[in-house]
Amino acid sequence: MTDPNLYFTMAGAGLAGLGMICMASLAGWRGWLALKEREINAYADHAGHDGPSLPNASARIEIADLKERIRKLEAIASGVDL
């Protein structure tokens, strides 16, 4: 049971397995980074052509006004006095 070849073989197999796991993890990490880079580039290209990503202040005010008018119409339809 104290055969040194067994210990060297087990150590070599463990080291080879650890190396394979590290290489597979590194390949996955690089793939994930490439995916995120493509997502960032696609977002930058899309945002550059369509203008700003957030609506301007006048559009937000108009949307808030429309929401208020809808709320009032719903209250009228349900018979609630404002």
Image (tube, rainbow, N blue to C red):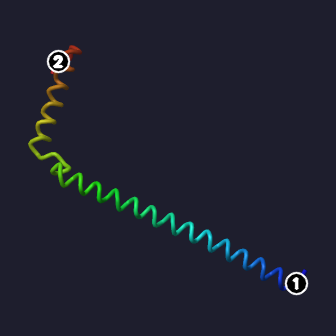
Q: What percent of the width, then of the height, locates residue 82?
A: 15, 21
Picture residue at 46% right of the left edge, 63% below the top:
31
**Viewer-proximal residue among 70 and 56:** 56
Q: Are marks 2 and 1 in contact (CB under 8 Å)?
A: no
Q: Is residue 6 above or below residue 40?
A: below
Q: Is residue 52 above or below residue 34?
A: above
Residue at the limit of the structure toward the bottom, as seen here: 4
Position of the N terminus by quadrant: bottom right
Mark 2: amino acid: Asp
Q: Where on the picture, by quarter, is residue 55?
A: top left
Mark earlier in primary sequence (2, 1): 1
Q: Secondary structure at mark 1?
A: loop
- Whether residue 61 sits left or right of residue 6 in the image: it is left
Q: Is residue 55 above or below residue 29?
A: above
User: Which label belongs to residue 81?
Assistant: 2
Q: What percent of the width, then of the height, locates residue 11?
A: 74, 79
For disc 1, the neighbor class at 10 Å (few under 14, some 14 to 19, many from 20) is few
- Whether residue 82 sits left or right of residue 1 in the image: it is left
Q: Secondary structure at mark 2?
A: loop
Q: Where on the picture, by quarter, is residue 70?
A: top left
Residue at the limit of the structure toward the left, as seen here: 58
- Whether residue 81 sits left or right of residue 39 in the image: it is left
- Whether residue 74 sits left or right of residue 5 in the image: it is left
Picture residue at 21% right of the left edge, 53% below the top:
47
For disc 2, the neighbor class at 10 Å (few under 14, some 14 to 19, many from 20) is few
Mark 1: amino acid: Asp
State the residue position of label 1: 3
Number of residue marks: 2
Distance, label 2 to label 1, CA atoms, is: 93 Å
Q: Where on the picture, by quarter, is residue 64?
A: top left
Q: Is residue 6 above or below residue 68?
A: below
